[in-house]
Image (cartoon, rainbow, N blue to C red):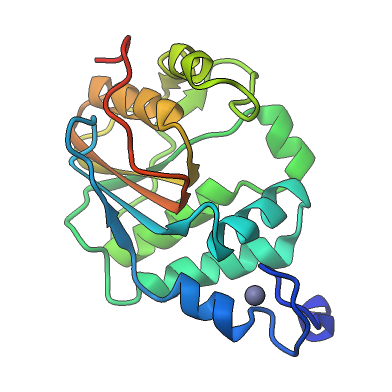
């Protein structure tokens, strides 16, 4: 809390001022989820709060790579206010995309899990830790082809799910890991899967080869 009071710059663009988020960045992030086209993907629908190249992406990078808890808290608050009126579609369970255990230890917080709790609260359903990571290679810095090849092998089912499952992650880049997670959720018993992320790097790509 003291940190928040002491902040004299925007956490997204680092411009000076009194606010944690400057008016420009606050206006850009807005208060509503944006639908991402989901045709030809494993998802029945997808939403993001903003673009990875914009203010929301800057906040996510600050939270994840600078380990800035103020940015993480701010992201959670932004999602909470976007979902204040409830979730845009009926959901039976919320599942977060799990990170690797060593990353979790290093960061000390798991942003996708916190976001999943916010979404589950808004939808009035439980968070189910349905997936686990299979191995420790991170997606960052890999080519699209490498990500697609790895995406299908990244996750395994821990707990069964049923009905419509909302998959939550902080970022959507190639979509390879999201598709890998969705494929496992469909194996785990989900009848359909939708996707909610804070920051999308672009449109959700078609189902990658090797995932069905
Ligand atoms: Zn700003």
Quarter assignment of residue 85: bottom left
- Kindly identify the residue that appears in the image at 32 percent across and 9 percent down: 210
Q: Answer above or below: position of 7 versus 39.
A: below
Q: Nearer the viewer, residue 108 or 143?
A: 143
Q: Which image quadrant shows ligand 1?
A: bottom right
Q: As displayed, is residue 165 above or below residue 154? A: below
* Residue found 52% across the figure and 52% down from its top: 52
Residue at (50, 25) in percent of width and height: 132
Quadrant occupied by the C terminus: top left
Q: Residue at x 22, y 48 (%)?
A: 92
Q: Position of residue 133 (x, y in %)?
A: 53, 23
In this rendered view, identify the residue nearer to me: 88 or 119. 88
Q: Is residue 42 above or below residue 22?
A: above
Image coords of residue 74 (percent x, y): 60, 70
In-image side of 105 versus 46 (left or right) = right
Quadrant of the snapshot with the N terminus = bottom right
Residue 114: image x %, image y %?
A: 53, 55
Residue 104 position, x and y percent, is 69, 38
């Amino acid at each position: 809390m003291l940190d928040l009071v002491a902040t004299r710059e925007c956490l997204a663009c680092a411009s000076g001022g009194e606010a944690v988020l400057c008016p420009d960045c606050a206006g850009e992030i807005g208060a509503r989820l944006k639908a991402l086209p989901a045709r030809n993907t494993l998802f029945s629908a997808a939403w993001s709060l903003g673009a990875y190249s914009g203010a929301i992406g800057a906040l996510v990078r600050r939270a994840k790579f600078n380990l800035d808890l103020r940015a993480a808290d701010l992201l959670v608050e932004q999602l909470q206010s976007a979902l204040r009126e409830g979730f845009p579609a009926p959901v039976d369970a919320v599942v977060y995309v799990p990170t690797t255990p060593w990353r979790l230890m290093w960061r000390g917080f798991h942003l996708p899990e916190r976001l999943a709790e916010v979404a589950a609260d808004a939808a009035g359903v439980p968070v189910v830790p349905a997936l686990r990571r299979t191995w420790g290679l991170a997606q960052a810095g890999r080519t699209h082809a490498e990500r697609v090849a790895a995406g299908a092998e990244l996750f395994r089912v821990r707990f069964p799910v049923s009905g419509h499952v909302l998959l939550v992650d902080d970022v959507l880049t190639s979509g390879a890991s999201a598709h890998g997670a969705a494929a496992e959720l469909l194996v785990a018993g989900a009848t359909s899967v939708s996707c909610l992320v804070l920051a999308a790097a672009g449109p959700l790509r078609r189902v990658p080869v090797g995932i069905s």
